Amino acid sequence: MYKQAGGWELALSPVLLALVGYGLDRLFGIVPLLTVVFAVVGLAGAVTKLYFGYRTEMEAHEAAGPWAK
């Protein structure tokens, strides 16, 4: 089974959320505060998802190895 490395998530999550933040900034007429906040939240979410996905995959790999029996 082909497993994505997460590059698209890592690149697009902050960009998409920054665009949402930019739209809200324009709507409310405030400094680009929400753009930065949403971009950071998107990056943190993508990194967190990749980290926990990696840990889960490695735990499954360790449990299936011949050394685990």
Image: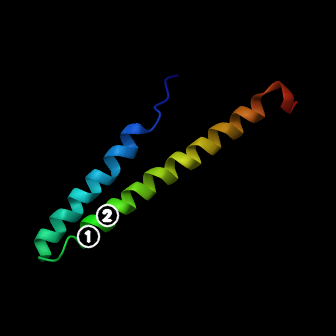
For mark 2, what is the residue? Answer: 38
The local secondary structure at tag 1 comes to helix
Q: What is the x, y in percent for residue 48?
A: 51, 54
Specify few, some or many for label 1: CA neighbours under 10 Å numbering under 14, 14-19, or 20 or more.
many
Q: Position of residue 14 (x, y in %)?
A: 33, 53
Question: On screen, 15 above or below 67?
Answer: below
Amino acid on which disc 1 is placed: Leu
SS state under label 2? helix
Separation of residues labelled 2 and 1 (CA atoms): 6 Å
Circle 2 packing at 10 Å, graded few (<14), some (14-19), many (20+), is many
Q: Is residue 41 left or right of residue 32?
A: right
List the single residue furthest toward the top: 1
Residue at the image position 70 percent from the left and 32 percent from the top? 61
Marker count (numbered): 2
Dividing the picture into quarters, in which one does residue 34 lie?
bottom left
Q: Is residue 68 above or below residue 41?
A: above
Residue at image x 13%, y 76%?
28
Name the residue nearer the viewer: 31 or 2.
Answer: 31
Where is 63 relative to 50, above or below? above
Q: Which residue is mark 1?
A: 34
